[in-house]
Amino acid sequence: MLSLKQISKTFNPGTVNEKKALDQVNLELADGDFATIVGSNGAGKSTLFNAITGAFYVDEGQIILAGENITYRKEHIRSKEIGHLFQDPLKGTAPHMTIEENMALAYLRASTSSHAFFSRISSKEKQMFKEQLALLNMGLEDRMKQPVGLLSGGQRQALTLLMATMVTPKILLLDEHTAALDPATAQKVLDLTKRIVAERRITCLMVTHNMHQALELGNRTLMMDSGRIVLDISGEERSALTVEDLLQQFSLQAGKQLDNDRILLSK
Amino acid sequence: MSSIFTLSIVQSALELGCIYSLVALALFISFSILNIADLSTDGCFTLGCAVGAVVTIAGHPFLAFPAAMAAGVASGFITAFLQTRMGVPSILAGIIVNTGLYTVNIAVMGFSSNVNLFACDTIFSLAKDKVAADWYNSWYKIILVVAIVLLVSVILAWFLNTRLGLSIRATGDNEHMVRASSINPVFTITVGLCLSNSLTALSGAILAQYQKSCDINLGTGMVTIALASLIIGETIIGKGGMFKKVIGVILGSCLYRFIVAVALRMSVPAECLKLVSALIVAIAIAFPYLKGQASFLKTRKTLERAGRKDGGSVC
């Protein structure tokens, strides 16, 4: 589904702040793969996502999504096929617009014809949005006309997830999307993620700092360090792995001791 | 007090308020919705006025409006082009276009600093005497401008709820969301600025026919006045749907004209009008903040008094 071929990105080249954020990254994701990504801050996880979504163009290499080369395709065109959730729940929705309007925007991806520009939200679509919201079990279906700014972070993140997957994306990128939520809400959003991804067989990449999640969720675990993928395990090898093993692997592969207490503490 | 609020003052405040409310609506699109301070408003208003005046003089009082709007769209497109394709910061783009428009405006008026329309037909002179009734002859101007403004508001409120309108609103509301969804911000900003500038220019063209003249300095300070109207409108309406907000902006514009008319009536010399405008704008913008502060002080005082009564110490 997604294949990254030798992609590299250097920020601020030729200055003292030069940083090689992605270093010859290769990755093949099969259709329906759900891979978790771990790695310390600055390892290049978010940069990897931004390279895929097109926030910047890579310096070298190719990005191929569903057989199409999208390396130099513009961000808003790519986003028709890519769902992207951020850590900050405020980033995924427009606060001064109603729930209904936000969903209508997300549903725009479904329409490719240009005459849709001047169409309004139909009552059939409203009904569909309502049914989808009801699946969240958060009572949002009765608050369609309320601005999204009034919702809590968890509700907004759940809504964002719904919006990102309303038109099934070819790939879903989850950038620590539960990290800013309280444990109970995080679990709820996570369960929702699992359900949606499984039901629609969406190919998915998820950044997490929780080692348990990294091994439990999905069918593959990647580890990044200094802009490279240093570990890529799946299948039996993965199911035999414990959190301790994973931490040990990290220091082995990266060739350095863990200095990130956020990883150590997140048991 | 009755001498301050004469019928003619109310009438002229309504007429001017409605005409200028189109500029306030333009800023509603660029400033409130797109979150862009479009400083080309002053020049664009004069552009609309000049184009409207010249086309009217050529004998086409109705064609004057679409012509002025087309000129506004062109001006808005250049502002948008500079900021979305050339990397010019949005405020600078407005200033650059505003500066350039001065020459364009003079050129439109045949390289003279003012033109007058006394000898030609305008929509107002055509509408006059259509109905032989006393009330009509004192109200026909208001009927005309209210009709135009209502038409524009209905279309605008409808447009802002279409998919394209929603995309434009999202562009100014959450940059991150727009980047992650399939909206092209370059396109939405361009459409938004073209639309807002066409309204500014339309307002200028109506004013040209209303006061039967056009002057190169007519637009000076227009952005401040429109901003004041917009903020007064948002303060009195508060939350609500798009149509309610649009109506609020129009009411704000009329209220602003009313305040200015009263100020003039209370023998403020005409030369001081710009200062009065600036004061009104400052007060209108500061008002919601001061209201919040006042209610906070009140709560605090009540709590402190209650605390003292309970014998607790206040630190």
Image: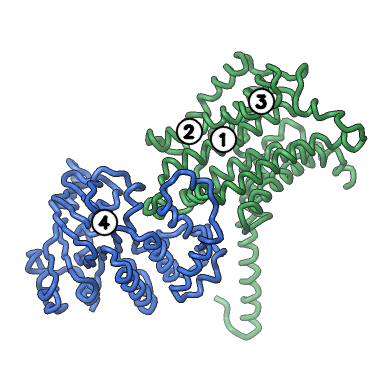
Q: Where is residue B162? Give x, y as percent.
A: 54, 49
How packed mark 2 is, by other alpha carbons closer than 10 Å (few <14, some 14-19, many 20 or more), is many
User: Which of the pair B20/B4 is nearer the observer?
Assistant: B20
Q: Quadrant of residue B216?
A: top right
Instruction: Identify the residue at horizontal 56%, vertical 51% (top origin).
Output: B161
Report the amino acid beneath label 3: Leu
Q: Which mark is residue B197?
A: 1
Instruction: Identify the residue at horizontal 69%, vertical 47% (top origin).
Output: B252
Furthest residue to the top?
A: B111
Q: Which mark is residue B63?
A: 3
Report the amino acid beneath label 4: Phe
| CB contact under 8 Å: marks 1 and 2 | yes
Lateral position of residue B74 relative to residue B143, left or right: left
Q: Which residue is mark 2?
A: B79
Q: Looking at the image, is mark 1 or mark 2 earlier in the sequence?
A: 2
Letter of the chain shown blue in the rendering: A
